[in-house]
Amino acid sequence: MNMSNIYTTNQKDARRQSIMQAAVQLFKTQGYSEITMKQIADTVGTSKGTTFHYFATKEDLFMSILLENYQQFFTDLLIKLEGYSQISEEVYVSFMVDQTENLIRNHDVLVRLNTIRGPILEGKANMDETVAKRNNLYAISKQVGQKLFEKTNGLLTQNQFSHIFIIQSGIISGLMNMASLTRFNHTDLKVDYPDFEIELIPEARQQMNYYLIEYLKEYKKNE
């Protein structure tokens, strides 16, 4: 085996990750439309051409960030679930509510990118690459659903467990979008809309809790 080829592959992977990390840091403080590939390249300390070598468009870059990091989120969930010997209905609800907060606190970039996935990212992202990454994400989500099925002794089906993560994402994205009515393009507005105010984490936890309790109640009723 040619060691130089391995080293070159590792270098390429490291450079690709550094580009993605730079894009994430910029996205935390700027709107998507404000970020340019040149700005990302300057942050990394490379040329714009090198950046385009790894990602053909800005949309490809941010779509990769979204799908690959969500895949890592599910991988981390699998590890967490291994720590449970058995999961009751109450523990499952609590687990999902806590993971809802975890997404908002520690993965807010993913949640924000999810809100622009359809209307913006899919417009110029490579469809074949996106579908391949989406297939990987789907596969790991099914593994999480299967693990929950096993740990809860069949509280829900694997498909239902996996589907609930989509509902979770929708709840968070919707609330996050509506929680920004007193801001415009990362700028605080000097306005007061008390009836529009949303306390994102408490309300996301509450909505997830309500949804799961009612969902499980209906499921048991219709069994």
Image (cartoon, rainbow, N blue to C red):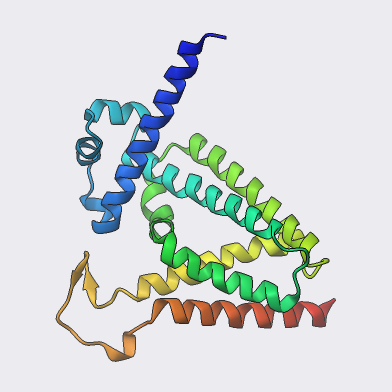
Q: Residue at x 60, y 63 (%)?
A: 165
Number of on-image labels:
0
Report which quarter residue 191 is drawn in: bottom left
Compared across the picture, whether 2 is left or right of 122 comes to right
Report which quarter residue 61 is drawn in: top left
> Residue lying farthest bottom?
195
Q: Residue at x 52, y 9 (%)?
A: 2
Q: Is residue 4 above or below residue 30?
A: above
- Work out which quarter of the rendered image holds the N terminus and state it: top right
On the question of residue 21 being in view, the answer is: yes
- Work out which quarter of the rendered image holds the C terminus and state it: bottom right
Q: Position of residue 208 (x, y in %)?
A: 56, 76
Report which quarter residue 131 is drawn in: top right
> Residue lying farthest left?
190
Q: Is residue 175 above or below residue 2?
A: below
Q: Is residue 48 above or below residue 177?
A: above
Residues 184 and 95: in front is 95
Q: Position of residue 141 (x, y in %)?
A: 64, 53
Q: Position of residue 113 (x, y in %)?
A: 39, 55
Compared across the picture, whether 71 is left or right of 19 comes to right
Q: Position of residue 48 (x, y in %)?
A: 23, 30
Q: Residue at x 22, y 65 (%)?
A: 186
On the question of residue 124 being in view, the answer is: no
Residues 58 and 74: in front is 74
Q: Residue at x 44, y 36 (%)?
A: 126
